[in-house]
Amino acid sequence: MITHLEGVLRTANPTGAVIDVGGVGYEVAIPLSTFDRLPRVGCRVTVLTHLHLREDGATLYGFMTAEERSLFRMLIGVSGIGPKIAVGILSGISPRNFRSAVLQGGVPLLSTVPGIGRKKAERLIVELKDRIAALEFEGGDEGAPAEGRAENDAALALVSLGYSQPEAQKAARAARARLGVGAAAEALIREALKSAG
């Protein structure tokens, strides 16, 4: 089993990357959240992996954090959720926001992901609620500074309003930079929407 790759990033796009490990190029499928964290092409990188085997071939999936990989593995264990939909979920919703959506019954947010209708969103919540509550996430609420929680809550709200996950995080971060670290989530949301308009 290939659990990680450490080497030089040769190519990268929002859905995949090639990592040169000792002269061998490994192609990995990645979610947008991992693409956003990759270094520049030509730099060294370590990517956690999951090898998905099927009758007609094998695909190596890559992730920058253990949380993303754990969530991916949970997702593909849900009936009707394959690797492509799991990657789509990770591309559209951060692990932390996905966890919040599952724990709070956020069917509308989950339904915004391509390939996830209302029924699949409800199934995800039912099947994952107990398991995901025990999963540790980077930057979770526990011990997180109040300003970090406000920024994350603002980003989650912006996603529910139609922003993509990367756009929402960028807008919330920019709003916090303008308003200062003490700004509440509501103020960050208003500032982000005002700037977008």
Image (cartoon, grey):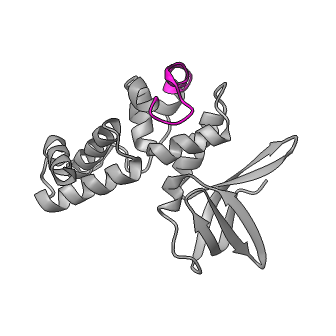
Point out residue 89 in the picture as x, y percentages from the top left corner: 52, 40
Residue found 13% across the figure and 45% down from its top: 187
Picture coordinates of residue 83, whole percent (x, y): 66, 41
Question: Bounds of the magenta span?
Answer: 111-129
Where on the picture, by quarter, is residue 53? top right
User: Could you tell whether 96 is left or right of 90 in the image?
Assistant: left
Residue at point 66%, 24% (across, down): 79
Left/right placement of residue 190 relative to residue 141 reads: left
Of 145 and 24, which appears nearest the observer?
24
* Residue shown at 29% from the left, 49% from the top: 144
Whether residue 150 sits left or right of residue 73 in the image: it is left
Is residue 106 among what the camera can see?
no
Nearer the observer, 27 or 163 = 163
Give residue 18's quadrant in the image.
bottom right
| Residue lying at the far right of the rendered structure | 55
Magenta region, mostly helix, strand or loop?
helix
Closest to the observer, 78 or 120: 120
Image location of residue 121, percent across then percent down: 50, 24
Tell me: residue 57, above or below residue 41.
Answer: above
Q: Is residue 112 shown in magenta?
A: yes
Residue 115, magenta (yes or no): yes
Note whether residue 58 is visible.
yes
Q: Residue at x 72, y 63 (%)?
A: 27
How many numbered discs? 0
